[in-house]
Amino acid sequence: MKNNTWKICCALVIIIAILTLTPLVLPEGKHKPELMGMPYTLWVGIAISVVLWLITYVAVLVHPGKND
Amino acid sequence: MFQKLLIAASIYLMIIIGLALYSRKGERTSKNYLMAGSSLGGLLGMFTFAASLFSTFTLMGMPDFFRVHGVGAWIFLAFSDALMVFGVIWFGYYLRKSVKESQHEYLGMAGFMEQRFQSKWVGYLMFLGVFIFLVPYVAIQIRGISIFLNQVFPDALPLWVWAVGLVVVMLVYSELGGLKAIIYSDILQGILLLIVVWIIGVFCLKSLGGIEAMFDQVEAKNDKLLSVPGPNGLFTLQFFIGSAMGIMLLPFSQPHISTRIMIMKDNKSLYRMALGLGFFAILVILPTAFIGMYGAINYADLSPAEFLGKTLINDQSEIIAVLVTIGLIAAAISTSDSLLFALGGELRSLLKGEDKQMVNIARIAIVFFGVVCLIFALLSNDQLVLLARTSFAGTSILAPLIFTGILVKNPALHKWLAIPTLIGLLLFVCSSLGVLPKVYFGIRAEIMIPIVLGLIAFMTVFILPND
């Protein structure tokens, strides 16, 4: 179970990394919709960093080599 | 203010020299001197990793990067750092496992690769690769802070005196206390960096009337800063891919960071360190965005040094300005000495002979590397972030060879991979110097070369017969 969760974490990180480099996160010349006044690429970028950190947190808990 | 700075700098110097003397206890073996005893806990590990990673380049380069190129700078560094942190957990585990299983006393990646590939030429190539790309990286730290100090105190000292002073300080205390001294000073620097960057960040935010008002003013001034590719068109897809690749691979391709993976007490400490580092990265980079936007509104047309001098010093109270200056000096010193020390470690890992004598050779070499970096610092240009990025991208060319050494059961069968790696390094250097094109088949050299080398390594290991 832990091994599968670790693999899911790895897959999620790869998927998020690919999506981040698409116009979904990096639309050229567009800064809307804004969040609390922040331009789109910045607030989505911050959200992605936080999500990646949370995935890393879960990955640490289930890492197959944790007790080596 | 110069007097107050001298007092504060003297106190800071006394603390780090004191820490260096405190670290001197115990026998001066390679393990103690170069690897700090290899028993670091998560918190200490986080500070030393962060201090080595977040340098002048972060504190001075990133605000300027936000100011000139806009919000895409977040993706450039924070996103890439988040991937790197995951990579530390993913592949850091394999690096430690591979070292443990091969019963190798790790003193540097060059020596480890020499042992894994059973080839001294692979070791020499690793050393050459890190040397040619880390020297400019150390040099820009020294140059960045020297230019800044020269800008802030134009009548005090010439630029070269600042640069020499910084190199002397870092050599003295790292020679005295070894990696332990560097780690202790890293804690001090990490805390200082965080405090300073947030004080200035909050000041910038407040003076612009909060986040919403700040971005409204940026939009009125230059709305291209609010999206990619930014006003100068720098933030293209290939720029982000190249940056992410270079930064993600730092823990394996840059020896001062690999060392920090190896000196952790156990895997649990490594993972705690990585988690702390991820959080630290977000905390440090966020205020640099505020500082950059403040500069974009108030100092859009100034040079980087003028913008930083005004924002970090002139616009602050004297006490804050002194704290900022000490923070910047500490940031430059802690990254540079880690790098110089790592170069010494890499050399030591290739040397065979009586340990004490080899440690002494490494110590002399560290002084030599310091002098080379100082000369380069006095001759290089002022594009801190772009030069740092070239260093990240350059060392990433070594990554396919390193991963083959770590992940493959018998890498000695593939020692010839050193030849395409050497060609890749030469191609990258030539394209960086403008001797060869920077783009091949529409793809930038810094992306193309590691990918081609990675494919060659993959085919060699998994497709071609291995006997």
Image (cartoon, coloured by chain):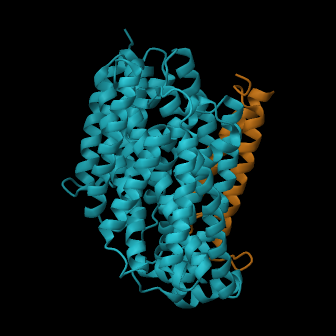
| Vertical arrangement, residue B324 with respect to residue B394, above or below | below
Would you say residue B158 is visible in this rendering?
A: yes
Q: Residue B246, position in %: x, y?
A: 45, 48
State the residue in front, B373 or B179. B179
Image quadrant occupied by the C terminus of chain B: top left
Q: Residue furthest left?
A: B435
Q: Residue furthest right?
A: A1
Residue A31, image quadrant: bottom right
Residue B282, image quadrant: bottom right
Q: Residue furthest top?
A: B467
Q: Residue B227, position in %: x, y?
A: 55, 74
State the residue in front, B47 or A44. B47
Q: Residue B155, position in %: x, y?
A: 35, 82
| Vertical arrangement, residue B456 with respect to residue B137, above or below | above
Q: Residue at x 62, y 33 (%)?
A: B264
Residue A7, image quadrant: top right
Count every numbered label the image shows and give the total. 0
Q: Residue at x 33, y 60 (%)?
A: B164
As drawn, the chain in orange is: A
Q: Residue at x 51, y 39 (%)?
A: B179
Would you say residue B241 is visible in this rendering?
A: no
Shade of chain B as shown in the rendered figure? cyan
